[in-house]
Amino acid sequence: MNHWQSTQDRSIHGAALSRRGFLAAGGALVVAVAMKPGAAPGAPATSLDATRPASWIEIHADDTLLIRTGKCDFGQSSIFTAYRQIVAEELGVPFEAITTVVSGDTDRTPDGGGTFGLLRTNVMNLRKAAAYTREAALELAAQRFGVPRDQVTVANGVVAGGGKSATYGQLVAGQDLRLTIPVGGELTGFGGLQVLGTPPLKPTADYTIVGKPYKNTIVRPKVSGETVWVGDVKLPGMLHARAVHPATLGSKLVAAGKVDKAQFPGARVVVIGNLVAVVSENEWEAVQAAQQVAADTKWTEWKGLPGHEGLRDHLRQSVKWDEVPAGKGGANKGDVVVAAAKTHAAAYFMPYLKHAPIGPTVSLADVRPDGSVTLHTHTQNPQYLRHLIAKMLGRAEDAVVIRTYPGPGHFGRSNGGNAGSEDEAVLLSRELGRPVRVQWMRADDMQWSTQSSTSQADITIGLDGKGRIVSYQADHKGPPMQDDRPIGAILAGLPTIDPPGPDNKSPVHGAVMNIADRWVYGAVPNVAEIGHGTYQIGQRESPIGVGLRDHSMRTPIQFQQNFPREVAITEAAALAGIDALQFRIDHTDDGRFKAILARLREESGWTTRPSPAPHARATGDGVVRGQGVSIMLRDNGYWACAAHVAVNPATGEVRVERLTIVVDPGIVVNPLQLRRQVQAGSLMGVSQALHEEVAFDQGGVTSEDWTGYPILTMAEIPDVKVVLAPKPDVGVYGQGSESANALAAPAIAGAFFDATGKPARRIPLRPEYVKAMLAT
């Protein structure tokens, strides 16, 4: 008999393979998850039945495959390229065999967790599921062929042994098979589920699909207009809404304005606590009526912020940095009070930065009379958003379904669930009994979304008589980095998760500043890195508990700590009279860093010499040019960047002419997509280095459009050279976009110093700040 004959479940490295029945036609092997009672430590009684979203992988009789993941694609393309390559590799099937990828919907995918660490941690769920599946198929084949399991192999989708062979589809044809694999974690928790067990993984040395430049299949439908974006979703009876947000971050509603019915007959005002909105069946009417209502709405006054011009003094003089326990660097060692021949000591600063998606957030909610909720959005963590919405409504989590779509990328703003308007859409739909679409306007998105946190650092570097670092000391200070509270829920006075603070027990919502920047200068004998956290600025002073809400953005915390470190290392190299790139080689004991720095020197056209450049000057007309370098270790990826800039001292204009990045990420899954990610990430970094800073006064954010928050223009894009230097024998997958953005700022600041002889210890390098730096 060709089919598996046993009626008992078979154990496949801890997974259970069962035959649910024979089928007259078709057939499939479906991979499901098993969360047994007690298998998820800390899971509340309301945890969902993780088996309901069904399968991670489905193998069909026609040899096609489907994969599902709770992760959302935000333009990285990893889910539609790298994920498919990794699963296909593990199964031993062609890349093209995976014809369908389902991602991000809570009712159609089996796992949770945000769209972060896509190739660091998240993909291990699918890779392990694929490994379990392959092993189950080999078991089926061994039974069918009548040979021992260890004599069965698979390649290119064909399983063979004992002189016989069959495709995956032929093995499952006519059967209804289920492979149940063990999982842990919590479905709607911040990190989601994790596949447990240790199925045998394919040796990386045998890879034939990983490493190939497969094209991203979702580009063409996006370009052709076939893709349904979140802004395209429509429901019968849908209303359009615009929020009327408070006058300041601490204002309470006194009286909502009224709609002139003669002018806007279809519009109406909805008030839920301090949440005010205008709805209409006509979107343009909603926009115009909301402007009228906003002008007529009365709010209490509040002034609890230092203003962005007073931020540095506020951080240094007003914040009590001893309210939160200090975090210590993992590489701390020795005694930094050791004697030094020369000492570099300076303070560094980074402002608040905006995620600033090109398209403001939009979402559509449908709350039914039975209390069930369907929410259409572009979140990066749908399961955690499901948790937040259920908590706000006081409903069970299984009453909420999140459907995700492509939308404007916002670089981590919604990796804790909400992107901005989802909760407002849900509350309005519940209030009105109809589907409601909430589109934030540009000013709403700029002023009421979260921002990447400000930071300051005091760094002291001691040098011996030969110019080698004998001590490195850094004190990093800043507010927390992850406020996932939905703003609509706060304004409406409804339950949310706790705000960031020292008493918040969540591992991601606390106030302790950890040292996230991996120490890379192992040859330095004495190191002390300390992180000092505090509350969000204005949060405790605000009557509604809303200050400058912070959130992670690309390379969170590490960016804020890497910038001062790398700029200070460049300045220390100048103090030692040594080339900045060679200085880094001299102080790392890691061969991978030495290799990529040597490669960077060749690829970038680096001129080996001390800084500042011989022609450096801080005054006069015409440009002066300089070179700068930075390095970073993130997610097991080794990165080095060289920037070449031109500075006009008379105007304060800084222009990045060339950017060269060398990356050794270990295994490169898809060189075509990785190169694209590095290019895009580095351009974001140039924009942050030259232009970006959140402006705010004593009441709230005053950056309300692209004039108040300028970003890099097409005309300013430099020549970007990306050099991939993989090292597959280390056995880990490398990530692409995050480090690239953080590398740019310190390299550009180093190049500014090289060109002018004046240090740049803050970003952005806007003309007004540049002129002040050059005048010192």
Image: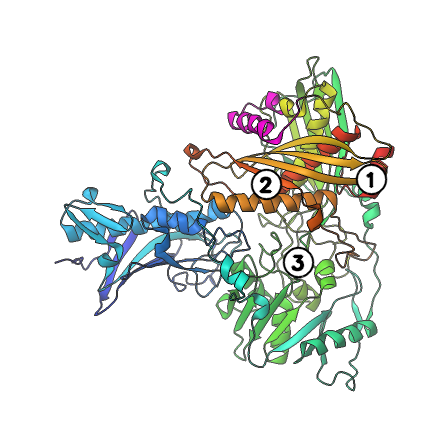
Secondary structure of the residue carrying numbered label 1:
loop
Q: Which residue does the image show at 22% across and 68% down from the upper left?
A: 23
Q: What secondary structure characterizes most of the magenta part? A: helix
Q: Which residue does the image show at 60% across and 71% down from the upper left?
A: 426
* Kind of residue at disc 2: Ser
User: Residue 652, which numbered label?
Assistant: 1
* In front of the other: 346 or 233: 233
* Kind of residue at disc 1: Gly
Name the image quarter holding residue 457: top right
x and y, in percent, of residue 60 in the image: 30, 61
Residue 485 position (above or below residue 283): above
x and y, in percent, of residue 555 in the image: 61, 43
Q: What residue does disc 2 label?
A: 739
- Disc 3 residue crowd, few under 14, some 14–19, many 20+, Cα 10 Å: few
- Disc 2 residue crowd, few under 14, some 14–19, many 20+, Cα 10 Å: many
Which range of residues does the magenta coloring cover? 584-608
Residue 728 position (above or below residue 612): below
Left or right: 431, with 770 as reference point:
left
User: Residue 358, which numbered label?
Assistant: 3
3D distance between C-alphas at marks 2 and 3? 21 Å
